[in-house]
Structures are given as C-alpha cells and as structure tokens.
C-alpha cells in the first residue's frame, strides 16, 4: 500500500508536467516536475495498476487504490528528488527517490523493493 502512496506524491521533477502539460508556478515545496508538491496525481505501478492520490497543502494525503480502497496519511517533500509518506497504518515514513527521465516521465522508486512507479499530475483541465 505504501508503495503506491509514495509514488503519488507525490510528489517532484523538471520544469513542466509530464506529457508537456504546463504546471502552475509555485513558491514553497517543489515536486520533481517543478510544480507544487500538493495536488492530484495518478500513480501507475510496475504492474500497470493505477491509483489516485490527492496530496493536500496541510501535509495530508488521501489515496484510492485500483480496487477503490481509500487510505490516508501524512507526507513531506524533503527535496524535489525525495518525497516521503506515511499511511495511518505505518509506523515510519518511507522516502521515495523521484526523478524525471530523459523522456520527461516522472518516476518514483520505492526504497524497500526498488519498484518504479510513474507519477502523473492531474491538472484542473484534466479533472
């Protein structure tokens, strides 16, 4: 479950959103994509399963997995390359390494198993 959460967030790479979608300018916490650390994201895991994560400015998140199961927790953006999250059932934060690859795809790597997920920011025009 926490593998999916971190990918979401969320949150943290280049100067524009993946797929060439412009990202709003921001001050404060910056994600790998150059946008704010908060927002709504899809997280596609290595198996192709897609979750949705809503990361709020107040340091909380709500994640809905492919089966519709909802989990909540807290997050921290320590740098554009490091997003940390802790679901309510976890004792400790897990910090994911986040990068933008040569094709502009936002990738988040789980430190526990090395699984890589693709993060996509959902802009208000897409929602």
Image (tube, helix red, strand yellow):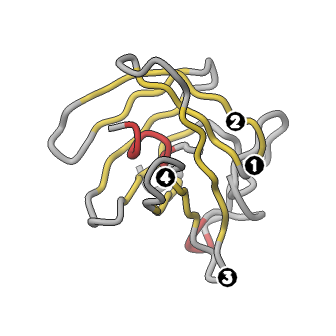
Q: Cβ–Cβ below 8 Å for labels 1 and 3? A: no
The image quarter containing residue 28 is top right
x then y, percent, for residue 59: 60, 21
55, above or below 11, in the image: above
Quadrant for the N terminus in the image: top left
Image point 58% across, 64% down: which residue? Answer: 106
Image point 66% across, 68% down: which residue? Answer: 100
x then y, percent, for residue 104: 63, 75
Q: Mark 2 points at which residue?
A: 77
SS at badge 1: loop
Q: Name the residue under label 3.
A: 102
x then y, percent, for residue 85: 53, 31
Q: Nearer the viewer, residue 87 or 52?
A: 87
Q: How many labels does the image show?
A: 4
The 10 Å Cα crowd at callout 3, few under 14, some 14 to 19, many 20 or more, is: few
Q: Which of labels 4 and 3 is toward the front?
A: 3
Measure the alpha-carbon separation of dots 1 and 2: 7 Å
Q: Which of 62 and 79 is in front in this view?
A: 79
Which of disc 1 and disc 4 is earlier in sequence?
1
SS at badge 2: strand
Q: Cβ–Cβ below 8 Å for labels 4 and 3? A: no
Q: Cβ–Cβ below 8 Å for labels 4 and 1? A: no
Q: Mark 4 points at which residue?
A: 122
Q: Mark 1 points at which residue?
A: 80
């Amino acid at each position: 479950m926490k593998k999916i959460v971190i990918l979401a967030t969320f949150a943290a790479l280049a100067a524009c959103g993946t797929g060439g979608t412009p990202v709003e300018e921001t001050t404060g916490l910056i994600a790998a994509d150059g946008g704010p650390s908060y927002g709504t994201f899809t997280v596609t895991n290595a198996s192709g399963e897609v979750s949705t994560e809503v990361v709020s400015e107040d340091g909380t998140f709500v994640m809905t997995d492919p089966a519709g199961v909802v989990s909540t927790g807290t997050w921290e953006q320590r740098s554009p390359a490091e997003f940390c999250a802790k679901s309510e059932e976890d004792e400790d934060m897990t910090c994911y390494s986040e990068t933008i690859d040569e094709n502009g795809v936002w990738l988040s790597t789980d430190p526990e198993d090395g699984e890589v997920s693709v993060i996509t920011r959902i802009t208000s025009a897409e929602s």
